[in-house]
Image: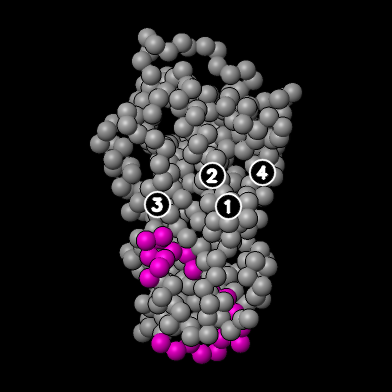
Amino acid sequence: MIGGMTGFSSYRQLCDGLNTAFLKLGIRDEELYEAAVRDPRTVLAGDQLIPVLCPIDYVTGYDGGRIRALSSCDDVFLLAVPPSFLPDVINGMPQEFAVLVESDSRDTAGYREQLVKLFPRSVVRDFEDPRAQNSTAALIAYTATVHPRDRAGAEETAGPEDTAILSAARLRGDPRLADEIWALCGSRLDWLGEYHPVVMEESREVFFRALYHDDTRIAVKFDQGRPACVGLFMEGLGQCDWLDPKFCERLESRAAAEAARMLYFYVIASRAPGGEGHAKDVMAALEKMIWQDGKVCHFLFEATNLSSLYIPRIAVRRAGASSYVELAPGETVRPIEKVDYWYLDVGGA
């Protein structure tokens, strides 16, 4: 407890226990949680004083400035719990404000109906991306199962030219290369989130934590000695602390039952020109690694409503052209879960 308020651990247990989405929802950082519950703008409810609405600045993973610009609202709050925890009357709010909602797509319609009743001056609005056929902001979890091709039928070559699989230990010993990889990934992810409330370009601290972890492998395509394309993937889901524990357990249990390898594809980013051509070489290096390992592999990756227009298609095309792996019979790269991002415009025009 924090001065009579629910502590972070209990709050997370509540959120994770009720969560149906593949991502952890709500406030995920303990220090920011403690700051949020002390902020007089945060709305607390229930006998144990649970934060149900908090200023967006206390929530990791969101670009507060971008959300304010996209919603044309200075005061933005996150719905930090399911709507059932909101009090019937919320006092002390600004005259005009926005409530950001993150919801499993299966819950979105019901959430919208509930919240409009709780905020009678509200209008439901979406974050639309004109580059993505005016689709609305979302993160989608994709999965695929690949099999190593028959060793007698696959020709082992030296692999794509100037492409290598690097370990985290190798990058820890080469800070210049690590910085170049960080710069490449950051520049390519920045444009992806232009109309999306979620921060695509991770902070340097978060990115390097993934880059340097021993479960990480890094496929790098070099052009004149510099990284031209980078693919990061992780062995297992243990380091994906933004994913819902129940979701991870379900996928890893399935992989273990099939004696399969579980890989999370963290990011792939190319330096223009030659983007997809470079990506082909990076993927080929990964495919060869799977072929050499000889195990069936379950992939998991995330895409936005924008990147979902091309990333899954590239993955299917690569598997079909690979000398080393093939998709499981009757399977393709498929979406399995989706989280929607939208907001209530309360008291606005």
How much space separates mark 1 and mark 2, taking CA atoms? 9 Å
Going by the numbered disc 3, the residue's amino acid type is Glu
Q: Earlier in the sequence, mark 3 or mark 4?
A: 4
Going by the numbered disc 2, the residue's amino acid type is Leu
How much space separates mark 3 and mark 1, taking CA atoms? 20 Å
Is 64 part of what is drawn in magenta?
A: no
Q: Earlier in the sequence, mark 1 or mark 2?
A: 1
**Secondary structure beneath label 1:** loop
Q: Which residue is mark 2?
A: 309
**Secondary structure beneath label 2:** helix
Q: Which residue is mark 4?
A: 188
How much space separates mark 4 and mark 2, taking CA atoms? 16 Å
Q: Residues within 10 Å of mark 4 (few under 14, many from 20)?
A: some
Going by the numbered disc 4, the residue's amino acid type is Arg
Discs 1, 2 touching: Cβ within 8 Å: yes
Q: Which residue is mark 3?
A: 337
Q: Is residue 167 visible?
A: no
Q: Residues within 10 Å of mark 3 (few under 14, many from 20)?
A: some
**Secondary structure beneath label 3:** strand
Q: Which residue is mark 1?
A: 133
Is 102 part of what is drawn in magenta?
A: yes
- The correct choice, above or below, for 181 with respect to 289 in the image is below
Residue occupying image coordinates x 47% and y 21%? 322
Residues shaded magenta: 88-110
- The correct choice, above or below, for 263 with respect to 294 in the image is below
**Residue 102: percent from the left, percent from the top?**
47, 64
**Residue 250: percent from the left, percent from the top?**
30, 47
